[in-house]
Image (cartoon, rainbow, N blue to C red):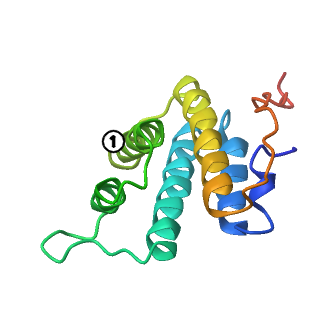
Amino acid sequence: MESNFLFLENEYPVLSRLGYLAEAYLYTDPNSCLVKLGMLAENIVGIMMKLDGLTVPPELDDTNANRIRTLKKNNLLPVEIDNILYSIRKTRNVAAHENYESAERCKVLLQMAWQLSLWFMQTYGRISFKAHNFVMPVEEPTAAD
């Protein structure tokens, strides 16, 4: 399977791997797909915090939500990226804590995570990076099919 997140491989192999795994789980384990997408977004937020030399204010818990708030407060998140992070974070929490799974929701969030990853690469990686088109993974036939 050719991953939509392969462009992250050289600079950010962990992000590339999380994106690849999310795609791989799309049809076979949507819950794991959602969790991996949450991990991808959370890792991007963590890398941003480190590269921008930011920490969560001491009066707040060091949670992903508070890291996102810190990035927003420092004007480092365009509205559309903040919305993507929110959607992925909230869905990942439901997946992790309530065993939620939905291949259809995964498809929406996969594309959003890809947009987030492109923005991240263009902002924190190679500025000259040219985006490729997102290709929705196809369901592989099983032996029972």
Residue that lies at the very extreme toward the left in this rendered image: 59
Q: Is residue 95 above or below residue 59?
A: above
Q: Residue at x 46, y 35 (%)?
A: 80
- Figure quadrant of residue 14: bottom right
Residue 112 position within the rendered picture, expressed as x and y whole percent measured from the top left: 57, 36
Q: Residue at x 87, y 44 (%)?
A: 2
The number of numbered badges drawn on the structure is: 1
Nearer-the-camera pick, 27 or 81:
81
- Figure quadrant of residue 17: bottom right
Q: Is residue 140 above or below residue 5?
A: above
Residue 125 position within the rendered picture, expressed as x and y whole percent measured from the top left: 69, 63
- Figure quadrant of residue 53: bottom left
Nearer-the-camera pick, 75 or 56:
75
Nearer-the-camera pick, 50 or 19:
50
Q: How crowded is the residue under tag 1: few (<14 C-alpha within 10 Å), some, or many (20+)?
A: few
Residue 65 position within the rendered picture, expressed as x and y whole percent measured from the top left: 30, 55
Q: Is residue 24 above or below residue 60?
A: above
Amino acid type, callout 1: Glu
In the image, is 8 to the left or to the right of 34?
A: right
Q: Residue at x 65, y 42 (%)?
A: 114
Q: Quadrant of the C terminus?
A: top right
Nearer-the-camera pick, 141 or 45:
45
Residue 99 position within the rendered picture, expressed as x and y whole percent measured from the top left: 40, 41
Dot 1: element: helix
Q: Quadrant of the N terminus?
A: top right
Q: Residue at x 36, y 59 (%)?
A: 71
Q: Which residue is mark 1?
A: 98
In the image, is 97 to the left or to the right of 115?
A: left
